[in-house]
Image (cartoon, grey):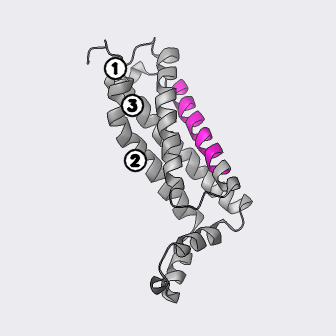
Amino acid sequence: MLRDFNWKALIAVGLLAGGIQVVAGVVMYVVGIYFVPWSMFISLAVLLLCIVYLTPRYRDSALNSRLSYRQALIVGIVISVCTGIVYAVYNLISISFFYPNFLERMVNARLATMPDSERTPEFIASMREGATAKTIAFSNLIRLSLFGSSLTIFLAFYLKDKHTKPR
């Protein structure tokens, strides 16, 4: 089953999806919506669109236009994990070198959504201590990989060929 895949092409599709996710992240940051609570849904929607759009492209180019449920599941999981890895690397690089005030802006945005009674000096200090490029990158890696993989369980029913029999 796993040898049915063109892994080089599949990883390339996953890296393309990760690149699209990075572009979306940059646009959200430049436009000023990266730190709003609902921006995470934009990232997840971009991932969903990448899975839905790129899976059939991979099927047509690498799987002789045939796609079983299992194949669709594996393709979606690979796209999700590659997207998470690329976005995590982007987070590490961009926060460390290009967005000097990113961590402070993120903490301030989170604090702005909290009631005054919860903003104790101890809580603020622990938020600042926990806000690192590594924690952000790791949480985005996990979020994108798990959400995309979970969603793929259902999307694979839609993306598989209707006439393909299970193996």
Please state which amino acid type lies under the numbered disc 2.
Answer: Leu
Pointer 1 residue: 68
Secondary structure of the residue carrying numbered label 2 = helix
Picture coordinates of residue 110, whole percent (x, y): 53, 71
Pointer 2 residue: 146
Secondary structure, magenta segment, majority class: helix
Please state which amino acid type lies under the numbered disc 3.
Answer: Ile
Question: Which residues make up the magenta segment?
Answer: 7-26
Q: Residue 12 colored magenta?
A: yes
Checking the image for residue 74, the label placed there is: 3
Q: Residues within 10 Å of mark 2 (few under 14, many from 20)?
A: some
Q: In the image, what residue occupies the spot 62% across and 39% down?
A: 19
Picture coordinates of residue 129, whole percent (x, y): 54, 77
Number of numbered discs: 3
Checking the image for residue 136, the label placed there is: none
Quarter the C terminus occupies: top left
Q: In the image, what residue occupies the spot 65% across and 43% down?
A: 23
Label 3 and label 2: CA atoms lie apart by 13 Å
Q: Are marks 3 and 2 in contact (CB under 8 Å)?
A: no
Relative vertical location of residue 164 with respect to residue 100 in this rendering, above or below: above
